[in-house]
Image (cartoon, rainbow, N blue to C red):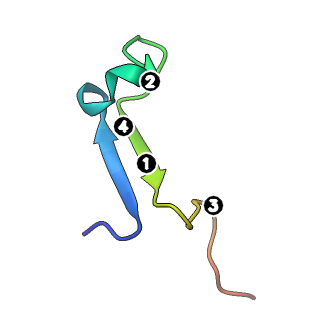
């Protein structure tokens, strides 16, 4: 289940992005407005 983000396959990338070439990945994860994607956990050690 996706929450606060969208996952697109390469064939779903909008044409206006001009991402239809071999140098882009097969998937793109896009954070919803007001959210961001970061590496790691929110927990403190």
Element marked by disc 1: strand
Give percent across and percent down for residue 5.
40, 60
When the figure is inspected, residue 31 is found, relative to residue 13, above or below; the finding is below
Which comes before the other along the chain, label 2 or label 1?
Answer: 2
Element marked by disc 2: helix
Which mark is nearer the camera, 2 or 1? 2
Which mark is nearer the camera, 4 or 2? 2
In which quarter of the view is residue 25 placed?
A: top left
Q: Which residue is mark 3?
A: 39
Element marked by disc 4: strand
Report the residue at 59% width, 62% height from top.
Answer: 36
* Residue at the outermost right position: 45
Which comes before the other along the chain, label 3 or label 1?
Answer: 1
Kindly check if marks 4 and 1 are in contact, taking CB atoms under 8 A apart as contact: yes
Structural distance between the alpha carbons of marks 3 and 1: 13 Å
Give percent across and percent down for residue 45.
75, 88
Q: Which residue is mark 2?
A: 17
Structural distance between the alpha carbons of marks 4 and 3: 17 Å
Q: Dot 1: few (<14), some (14–19), or many (≥20) neighbours within 10 Å?
A: few
In which quarter of the view is residue 17 placed?
A: top left
Structural distance between the alpha carbons of marks 2 and 1: 14 Å
Residue 29 marker:
1
When the figure is inspected, residue 28 is found, relative to residue 41, above or below; the finding is above
Report the residue at 40% width, 22% height from top.
Answer: 16
Q: Dot 2: few (<14), some (14–19), or many (≥20) neighbours within 10 Å?
A: few
The quarter of the picture where the N terminus appears is bottom left
Q: Which residue is mark 4?
A: 27
Element marked by disc 3: loop
């Amino acid at each position: 289940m996706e929450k606060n983000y969208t996952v697109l396959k390469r064939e779903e990338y909008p044409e206006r992005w001009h991402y239809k070439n071999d140098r882009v990945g097969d998937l793109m994860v896009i954070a919803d407005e007001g959210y961001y994607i970061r590496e790691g956990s929110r927990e403190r050690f």
